Image (cartoon, rainbow, N blue to C red):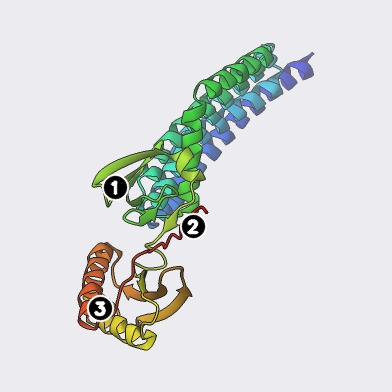
């Protein structure tokens, strides 16, 4: 009988020793965090490691203590061991969810903001906070489902209900989600950037002013108007980016002269006009080519390069005006269509 009592006291002493050792181990771990890990994180440029260490340190301390308490109760065969075990699991799930709730959005913010700062588009500045909020909601739901599962509650109907609700929301927001995903595509693929000039498949010349989460705003250079296009529509368009690979623009100016004109003389006059035109580059040099025999004229093509696409209208105006003046001086005829009709009289 004495041996049994002695053994019982020994178990309690061992349980107490487990708690003391666990407490000491938790204190040593906290000292390691504060002395080494936090000092190391303070020397790095990023703030994410500081947040992770600060967030994980305290929950890890309590988890170690709870584990020590559980092992101590196991050693003395505490009567409510299963209930204690369940409670510890629930507390562990809550702590784990809380750590993930703090750390994962911080990682998204740190690296998402870093990516957004390297881009000119505002779309990623809008997307990052949205992704953060979605991640937080998702983590809370996952944590809640884990706790309910530990409590032996059937979470299948809840998951199915959330799935049905998600489908209904997706259908209701179909257009909005389509524009959002197209916005993601524009951010990742980057077919253009702010300030680029685009020629739409409708023929409109536009400058990119803003790329948002739902739509993109374009400035119509010719009409002096602001166009708002949903991202889903814009991603399907054929876009010609005339700002890439650089802002230089190749102009093709067609001109027709009368049959019988001296082609070499016409080419010489066109090249003289191109060389004296403002904003026309010497490299690549202007060229004039005899393009085709048309019904009423000999068609030539004057090809010039200009330094800035914004000067296109002014350069074309200057060259066309000078062509008219020089052709009149050089007696070079610009023909117009003539049709000769033969009417046969009835006999």
Dot 1 falls on a residue whose secondary structure is: strand
Between disc 3 and disc 1, whose residue precedes? 1
Which x, y percent locates residue 102? 45, 35
Between disc 2 and disc 1, whose residue precedes? 1
Which x, y percent locates residue 269? 28, 84
**Image quarter in which the N terminus is found:** top right
Q: Which residue is mark 2?
A: 344
Which x, y percent locates residue 140? 51, 24
Q: Nearer the viewer, residue 16 or 44?
A: 44
What residue is drawn where x is 39% and y is 54%?
199
Dot 3 falls on a residue whose secondary structure is: helix
Q: Is residue 48 visible?
A: no
- Residues at circles 2 and 1 in contact by the CB criterion of under 8 Å: no
Q: Which residue is mark 3?
A: 327
Q: Nearer the viewer, residue 100 or 13?
A: 100
Residue 308 position by quadrant: bottom left
The CA distance from mark 3 to mark 1 is 37 Å
Give the class, few, some or many, for how many residues have Cα within 10 Å of label 2's Cα (few <14, many ≥20): few
Give the class, few, some or many, for how many residues have Cα within 10 Å of label 3's Cα (few <14, many ≥20): some
What residue is drawn where x is 23% and y is 73%?
324
The vertical placement of 310 against 159, above or below, is below
Which x, y percent locates residue 109? 41, 42
What residue is drawn where x is 26% and y is 84%?
272
Residue 290 position by quadrant: bottom left
Q: Nearer the viewer, residue 185 or 46?
A: 185
Give left or right: position of 94 versus 38: right
Between disc 2 and disc 3, whose residue precedes? 3
Q: Nearer the viewer, mark 2 or mark 1?
A: 2
The vertical placement of 203 against 160, above or below, is below
Q: Which residue is mark 1?
A: 219
Residue 282 position by quadrant: bottom left
């Amino acid at each position: 009988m004495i041996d049994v009592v002695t053994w019982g006291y020994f178990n309690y002493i061992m349980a107490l020793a487990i708690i003391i050792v666990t407490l000491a181990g938790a204190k040593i771990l906290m000292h390691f965090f504060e002395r080494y890990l936090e000092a190391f994180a303070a020397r790095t440029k990023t703030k994410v490691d500081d947040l992770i260490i600060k967030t994980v340190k305290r929950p890890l301390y309590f988890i170690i203590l709870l584990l020590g308490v559980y092992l101590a109760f196991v050693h003395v065969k505490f009567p409510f061991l299963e209930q204690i075990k369940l409670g510890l699991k629930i507390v562990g799930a809550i702590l784990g969810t809380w750590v993930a709730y703090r750390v994962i959005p911080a990682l998204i913010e740190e690296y998402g903001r870093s990516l957004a700062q390297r881009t000119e588009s505002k779309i990623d500045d809008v997307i990052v906070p949205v992704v953060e909020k979605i991640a937080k909601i998702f983590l809370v739901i996952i944590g809640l489902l884990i706790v309910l599962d530990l409590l032996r509650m059937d979470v299948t109907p809840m998951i199915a209900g959330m799935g049905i609700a998600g489908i209904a929301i997706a259908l209701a927001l179909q257009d909005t989600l389509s524009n959002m995903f197209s916005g993601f595509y524009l951010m990742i693929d980057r077919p253009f950037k702010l300030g680029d000039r685009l020629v739409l498949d409708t023929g409109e010349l536009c400058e990119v002013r803003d790329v948002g989460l739902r739509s993109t705003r374009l400035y119509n250079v010719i009409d002096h108007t602001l166009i708002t296009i949903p991202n889903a529509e814009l991603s399907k368009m054929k876009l010609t980016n005339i700002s890439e690979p650089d802002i230089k623009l190749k102009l093709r100016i067609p001109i027709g002269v009368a049959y019988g004109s001296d082609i070499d003389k016409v080419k010489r006059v066109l090249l003289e006009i191109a060389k004296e035109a403002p904003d026309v580059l010497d490299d690549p040099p202007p060229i004039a080519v005899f393009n085709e025999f048309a019904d009423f004229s000999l068609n030539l093509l004057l090809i010039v390069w200009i330094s800035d696409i914004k000067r296109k209208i002014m350069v074309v105006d200057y060259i066309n005006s000078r062509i008219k003046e020089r052709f009149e001086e050089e007696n070079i005829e610009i023909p117009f269509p003539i049709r000769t009709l033969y009417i046969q009289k009835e006999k």
